[in-house]
Amino acid sequence: MAITHGYPGAGEQVRERESSQVVVLPPVESKSGLKCQLTKLRQIQVNAARTEFNLGLQKLRDTHVRNEEQRHEALIKEQNRVRKREAKQERIRLKHYHATKIQALIRSFFVRAFVLPSVLETKATAELKRSRVALSETMLCLHQNIHDLAFIEQDRCVSATRIQAWWRGVFAKRIVAIISLRIHLFKMGKRMDQAATRIAAYHRGQQARMGCTRLRLEREKRMQQANKKKEAQMIRAIIKVQSHIRRRMAMKNIQVRREALSKELEGEAGTTSEALD
């Protein structure tokens, strides 16, 4: 009798092993001996099945333990991986944080070393300029006060007269410069008019000469054409006269030949008639 509880598929494995195991018993002689052998055979089969089942169960336990160990190791590996990832991210974060801090320190150092001196110098220069302007204004006020204390109304009139004289002299120089410039421009205008007149005269003379040359060439061309026409007319008249003279001479030659031919014919007729007579 096979035990089929434990794990799924154990009964089928036991039945397969029982069917594959063949127990050969010696021949029996009596029924009691046969029953005893059958009982022993069943006991052997049960023991074999139990042994097989225990072996399979032990294998399942080993497999389960091994799987549990593998799962535990995988879990530990995953936890280690997660811890490593977190540690790496933390290192990267710390690296970025420290790099940012170092960059800020370096920037502040460069600003303090290079930018701040120029800014302070610019600020000091602007402050110095403002102080100079304020000092100059103060000195001007002080100079005006001292001037009011040092000079009287008569000195002011003399100074105003001198300033007016100087300014009138400046105006006079400017007016003289303007007048001299106008005179120079007038002279230059006259010279430019004369130059323009000369250029126009030269251009008109050149155009006139070119026109005379063109007219002379046209007249020569017309004279040549007239001479060619006269020569052509003379040649045609000569050809007509020559043809008329040749025609007259040809007619005369023809008349002479006709007369000679008629005389020959008359002479031949006379000789023929005399021969017949």
Image: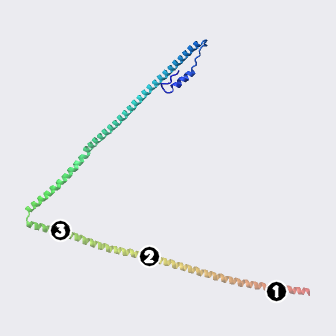
Tag 3: Cα neighbours inside 10 Å, few (<14), some, or many (≥20)?
few
Q: CA distance from mark 1 to mark 2?
A: 82 Å
The type of residue carrying mark 2 is Gln
Residue visible at 20% across and 52% down in the picture = 126
Badge 3 element: helix
Residue visible at 61% across and 82% down in the picture = 233
Residue visible at 51% across and 78% down in the picture = 218
> Are the residues tagged 3 and 1 within 8 Å (C-beta)?
no
Q: Position of residue 209 (x, y in %)?
A: 45, 76
Q: Position of residue 98 (x, y in %)?
A: 30, 38
Quadrant of residue 149 in the image?
bottom left
Q: Which mark is residue 167?
A: 3
Write down the residue under mark 2.
207
Seen in the picture, residue 245 relative to 146 is either above or below; the reply is: below
Residue most toward the right?
Answer: 277
Q: Which mark is residue 263?
A: 1
First reached walking from the N terminus: tag 1 or tag 2:
2
The type of residue carrying mark 1 is Lys
Asked which colour scheme the image uses, the reply is rainbow
Nearer to me, 165 or 138: 138
Give the foreground label among 2 and 3.
3
Seen in the picture, residue 258 relative to 184 is either above or below; the reply is: below
Nearer to me, 206 or 21: 21
The type of residue carrying mark 3 is Trp
Q: Position of residue 57 (x, y in %)?
A: 47, 23
> Are the residues tagged 2 and 3 within 8 Å (C-beta)?
no
First reached walking from the N terminus: tag 2 or tag 3:
3
Q: Position of residue 178 (x, y in %)?
A: 25, 71
Tag 2: Cα neighbours inside 10 Å, few (<14), some, or many (≥20)?
few
